[in-house]
Image (cartoon, grey):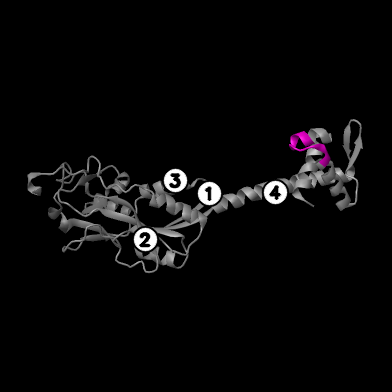
Amino acid sequence: MDVRDLECFLAVTEEGTISRAAERLHMTQPPLTVRLRTLERELGVELLVRHGRGVTVTAAGRLLAEHARRLLADLSATSETVRAVGLGTHGKLALAIGHSIAPRLVTRLVGALGSDVDLALVEVSDAEVLDRVHHREAHAGLLHRSSPRRASGLEVAVVSRAPLVVVLPAAHPFAGAERVDLTTLLDDRIALSDTDFAPSPVPPRHRADSVPHALALVESGAGVALLTTDHIPQVWPGLVARPLRQHTAITESAVCWRPDEHSPVMRRFLRTALSTPEPDALGHPFARTPTPDDS
């Protein structure tokens, strides 16, 4: 049975005449009549009774119409799903996300995928991000660019650049300063366990496994934390973020993936990630105004 034959037969049953069905199908009556006769010969039964006012559908024809309607609907739905999967607009995407990656960045990268993509996000250490992508437990990963672990065998590309700020308790003596001198705070520094945004000869006083835990330590008075401007939305009341007086390296976040990973959804995610403008120019209030000391 040919799909086009079924479409023609359904059109006739729904229109009630061969002439109106031919008009609907944008074809002439003779080839439509040939298709109907061919379908009846193939099945060995009469599907339509022709008369002057049009056609009457036989019992066999009504059964065929019922099944054909479901079959054509299934074929249409299957075509749409296959097309969506091939274009990456439907499917699954598993992402391993390092503890240091700001939720704002994740929102920007996955927001364009749409609601038909099933997302599985897991937050792990930067080292585990690489392991999960290596072992195909995740299609791609997001991590801090200066992770000490080498991403051997993986593709890595920068997706975001952000300057550093220091997060202090609102009652801290430097909380009202326009800019904070980092050298005066090194002894009280809290670092993330697997990502030290600003390594220094002075070891951090405390370590935390995640940004929220680092902020909790800051609020408790245990010290101050160096984070990126992307983390500012996570800073809750009672804490303040201040720019640094010193020049510090711009912090880079990166995406990693296996070069042999061909998931259409992942490839679509990568197109979005790699087309994200990198913020080389820092905006207010973190753009640094040159001072005489800079010369």
Can residue 135 be found in the magenta stretch? no
Contact check, label 1 and label 4, Cβ < 8 Å: no
Callout 1 amino acid: Thr
Inter-mark Cα distance, 3 to 4: 30 Å
User: Which of the two discs, 3 and 2, labels the residue nearer the N terminus?
Assistant: 3
The residue tagged 3 is: 111
Callout 2 amino acid: Val
Residue range in magenta is: 22-30
Front residue of this view, candidates 121 and 288: 288
Dot in front, 3 or 1? 1
Inter-mark Cα distance, 2 to 1: 23 Å
The residue tagged 4 is: 74
The residue tagged 2 is: 156
User: Which of the two discs, 4 and 2, labels the residue nearer the N terminus?
Assistant: 4
**Residue 173 spot, x, y in % from top left:** 14, 45
User: Which of the two discs, 2 and 1, labels the residue nearer the N terminus?
Assistant: 1
Callout 4 amino acid: Asp
Inter-mark Cα distance, 3 to 1: 12 Å
Contact check, label 3 and label 4, Cβ < 8 Å: no
The residue tagged 1 is: 89
Dot in front, 3 or 4? 4
Contact check, label 2 and label 1, Cβ < 8 Å: no
User: Which of the two discs, 1 and 4, labels the residue nearer the N terminus?
Assistant: 4
